[in-house]
Image (tube, rainbow, N blue to C red):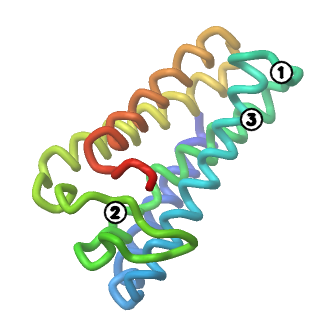
Amino acid sequence: MKKLHQILLFATAMGLAGAAAAQALKPEEKVKYRQAAYTFMAWNMEKIKAQAVDGSAPFDQAQVAAAANAIAAAANSGMGALYSPDTVGAVGFHKSRLKKEFFEQPDEVRQVATNFAEQANKLAEVAAAGDKAAIAKQFGEVGKACKSCHDKFRMKED
């Protein structure tokens, strides 16, 4: 738990520093950083899924906890600074699918983002405890949090 607390403090500090730095970025750079962060989180989600959900890989609690900590750190990193209206449709590694409604519904965005961070933090806590069934259940909650944002604020692929 102490390690998780340290990770979250570090992520918060980096997020604050990153917010200032993000203002100087070009829209396509912001999109690239976002896309890289989400790809990194997806990679870690896949590791957890394989080990704790579908059993396609042997369960290694330390690896699952590390993956969950990485997801929580990214969720708490201050990525919100990488979102600005000029990034709608901008091209990073590929074209952003962010809907303009993201900027028209700040309260909803805040709620969705807060829920995602809370669910990611809970996944890190559960993974640290090592209960495979509890990890699988919380993994589903993180997935629901991701889907909530995708359903509301991400365009379908072309």
Mark 2 or 1 closer to N-term?
A: 1
Residue nearer the viewer, 117 or 36 = 36
**Circle 3 residues within 10 Å: few <14, some 14–19, many ≥20:** many
Q: Position of residue 60 (x, y in %)?
A: 84, 26
Q: Position of residue 126 (x, y in %)?
A: 58, 22
Is 143 placed above or below 104 here?
above
Label 2 sits on residue: 80
Q: CA distance from mark 3 to mark 1?
A: 10 Å
Asked which quadrant contains residue 57, the reply is top right
- Mark 1: which amino acid? Ser
Q: Are marks 2 and 3 in contact (CB under 8 Å)?
A: no
SS class of the residue under badge 3? helix
Label 1 sits on residue: 56
Q: CA distance from mark 2 to mark 1?
A: 34 Å
Residue nearer the viewer, 60 or 149 = 149
Judged by depth in the image, the label closer to the viewer, 3 or 1, is 1
Asked which quadrant contains residue 133, the reply is top right
Asked which quadrant contains residue 106, the reply is bottom left
So how many labels did they put on this image?
A: 3
**Circle 1 residues within 10 Å: few <14, some 14–19, many ≥20:** few
Mark 2 or 3 closer to N-term?
A: 3
Q: Which corner quadrant holds the C terminus?
A: bottom left
Q: Position of residue 129 (x, y in %)?
A: 66, 20
Q: Is residue 90 left or right of residue 5?
A: left
Judged by depth in the image, the label closer to the viewer, 2 or 1, is 1
Q: Which of the numbered marks, if any, corresponds to residue 47?
A: 3
The residue sitting at 48% across, 36% down in the picture is: 121
- Mark 3: which amino acid? Lys
Give the residue furthest to the front.
Answer: 158
- Mark 2: which amino acid? Gly
Q: Is residue 115 left or right of residue 64?
A: left
Q: Which of the numbered marks, if any, corresponds to residue 44?
A: none
